[in-house]
């Protein structure tokens, strides 16, 4: 069996006592939710990073207020230069953390509840130029049946803007072979 570094991690004597509490609760969450080693490691890394930022400002993950956590989100963005997607993942992990603390009776509140979602920048899809489209459409060898089929598929997708999933679900009865 492969050695799982996340299971064998221990808290050193130099770690603050609250880090030991975080470790213990994370181990319990890992067992309850059947997290993979990678998921556990991601949660552990992010929560300890948040804990370190909170401790710099005299707070702690077990008692952090909404204002403390909003400040940490700002630090993650501006100081640590994390992407909005990484910050959103961290917020999601913190939400799981606070829900677990509520279930354990450690906290009565959920400081991130009702916090508006981050504005995510939507990336535009990449497009290819007209010359590349021409080369793509000409690439199938139309002297073979498979090549002719591939050429039809490419032209249909290009002409209609159809998604691959829509093309795959297309049936013969949906095709109008009479119209021009």
Image (cartoon, rainbow, N blue to C red):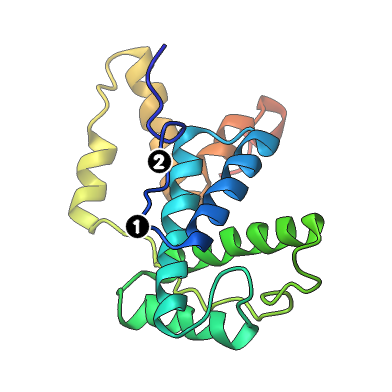
Answer with left or right where residue 22 lies relative to residue 106: left
Instruction: Looking at the image, tell me whether mark 2 or mark 1 is earlier in sequence order.
Output: 1
Q: Which of marks 2 and 1 is in front?
A: 1
2 relative to 162, above or below:
above
**Secondary structure under the numbered disc 2 in the rendered image:** helix
Estimate how packed mark 1 is, as few (under 14), some (14 to 19) or many (20 or more) residues with alpha carbons within 10 Å: few
Res 102 → quadrant? bottom right
Looking at this view, is 149 or 14 the one in front?
A: 14
Q: Residue at x 75, y 63 (%)?
A: 106
To which residue does mark 2 refer? 155
Looking at this view, is 174 or 67 the one in front?
A: 67
Res 144 → quadrant? top left
Q: Where is residue 139 in the image (x, y as percent from the top left)?
A: 22, 32
Residue 14 bears which disc, if any?
Answer: 1
Q: Position of residue 105 (x, y in %)?
A: 81, 61
Looking at this view, is 46 or 103 the one in front?
A: 103
Q: In which quarter of the image is the N terminus?
A: top left
Question: Alpha-carbon distance for marks 2 and 1?
Answer: 65 Å
Estimate how packed mark 2 is, as few (under 14), some (14 to 19) or many (20 or more) residues with alpha carbons within 10 Å: some
Q: Which residue is drawn at 57% across and 55% down?
A: 21
Res 66 → quadrant? bottom right
């Amino acid at each position: 069996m492969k050695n799982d570094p996340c299971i064998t991690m221990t808290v050193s004597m130099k770690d603050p006592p609250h880090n030991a509490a975080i470790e213990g609760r994370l181990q319990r969450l890992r067992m309850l939710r059947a997290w993979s080693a990678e998921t556990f490691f991601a949660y552990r890394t992010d929560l300890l990073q948040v804990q370190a930022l909170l401790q710099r400002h005299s707070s702690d993950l077990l008692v952090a207020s909404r204002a403390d956590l909003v400040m940490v989100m700002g630090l993650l963005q501006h100081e640590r230069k994390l992407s909005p997607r990484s910050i959103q993942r961290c917020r999601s992990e913190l939400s799981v953390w606070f829900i677990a603390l509520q279930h354990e009776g450690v906290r009565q509140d959920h400081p991130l509840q009702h916090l508006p979602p981050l504005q995510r920048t939507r990336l535009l899809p990449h497009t290819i130029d007209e010359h590349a489209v021409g080369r793509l459409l000409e690439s199938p060898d139309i002297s073979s049946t498979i090549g002719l089929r591939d050429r039809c598929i490419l032209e249909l997708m290009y002409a209609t803007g159809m998604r691959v999933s829509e093309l795959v679900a297309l049936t013969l009865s949906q095709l109008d072979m009479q119209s021009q």
